[in-house]
Image (cartoon, rainbow, N blue to C red):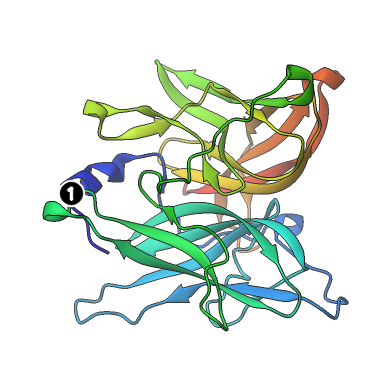
Amino acid sequence: MRFGFLSALALSLPLLAACAGPAPPLGDSVHVVDRQKTAVATIKGYSTPKSFLGAQEWTVIDAIDGKYAFYLSDIRNGIPLAPGPHAIVVAYHSGGSRFLVAFRLEARANESYVAKWREVDGGLLGLEGSTVVSIENAKTGEKVTPENRIHGIEPGQQYVEPSGPPETLATISATRQTSLFETSGAAFLQSVDGKTVEKKPGFLGISSEYDYTASFKLSPGLHALGIGIVAFEGSGHWVLPVMFDVRPGAHYTLRFEKDSQRADTTGEKWKAVTVWMTDETRNGEIVLPKTSIPVMRDYF
């Protein structure tokens, strides 16, 4: 993976999620599919051989439809998918760093898919060079999703809010907790149907960050939402992908709370965060179930 001067600065972006070691068992939080279905699709990651310097790049399928796929993300074997629309997060690994990219995939029966990447030409001196990730048909090589940059936004891939009478649209709002004027935790809208929401300008206009307080309009219907999560100092940035049927006129609020310490089956301790969504026009009814996500290993 090539980095120019600007790309090196961009490593401080919230999009970069720190590697926290192997993920713990999540029980019901792990993605499963009805294996009784006779017509299923599959999706998998991809890796390149190590270079003579030991460098390597690879992708894994991080989460699918509100469930994490940690153990099922075997690069050699595809993860089963029911035919139809899915919200998917791909984790791209390079140089010890992990970047999360959200997609909406319309899976077709008996097809196989693979998450791949390519380098974008950086132009003069490579100052704007970056990497884009997409999902391809494993048999034909056809890209079945648009390409998304791991830094910045690929042209045409920024989310554009719909227009129309308020009663025909919905809104979705973020929740943020602060400590000493800094964000100590947040649940916010990062993407809609694979398109990235607008970011606020950052340091010298070079780096940028998601707006942890913003509200966005949504058109009614079924959408793949990427819920961004900032939890603990040092835990990095996580994304929970969900397929959600938006109701016209609704006002949704993304919510989160930090969990008490939890342990996996090996006895290792993790810090976790619970994320859910409520509909304020229905007296705070929970419309996305609470999902507990272990985000950082706790050694004490």
Residue 250 in view, yes or no: no
The answer to which image quadrant residue 94 occupies is: bottom left
Instruction: Answer with left or right where residue 158 lies relative to residue 263.
Output: left
At a point 69% along the width and 47% down the height, the residue shown is: 242
Left or right relative to 161: residue 28: right
Q: Is residue 248 above or below residue 142?
A: above
| Tag 1 secondary structure | loop
Which percent across, then down, holds residue 7?
A: 24, 48
Q: What residue sits 39% from the left and 63% below the top?
A: 93
Residue nearest the viewer, comparing 281 with 22: 281
Label tally: 1
Report the amino acid beneath label 1. Leu
| Residue situated in front as seen by the camera: 147 or 276 | 147
Q: Residue at x 25, y 34 (%)?
A: 206
Image vertical order of residue 108 relative to residue 67, above or below:
below
Residue 147: x and y, percent?
A: 46, 58
Mark 1 crowdedness (10 Å alpha carbons): few <14, some 14-19, many ≥20: some
Quarter of the N terminus within the rendering? bottom left
Q: Check the image and name the residue furthest to the front.
A: 164
Q: Which residue is mark 1?
A: 127
Kindly indicate the quadrant of the structure image that contains residue 138.
bottom right
Residue placed farthest to the top in the image?
181
Residue drawn at (23%, 49%), measured in percent from left and top?
128
Residue 140 seen from this side: yes
- Residue 80 higher or lower than 220, as above or below: below
Q: Compared to 142, does 26 lie above or below?
A: above
**Residue 126 in the image, given as x and y percentages of width and height:** 17, 54
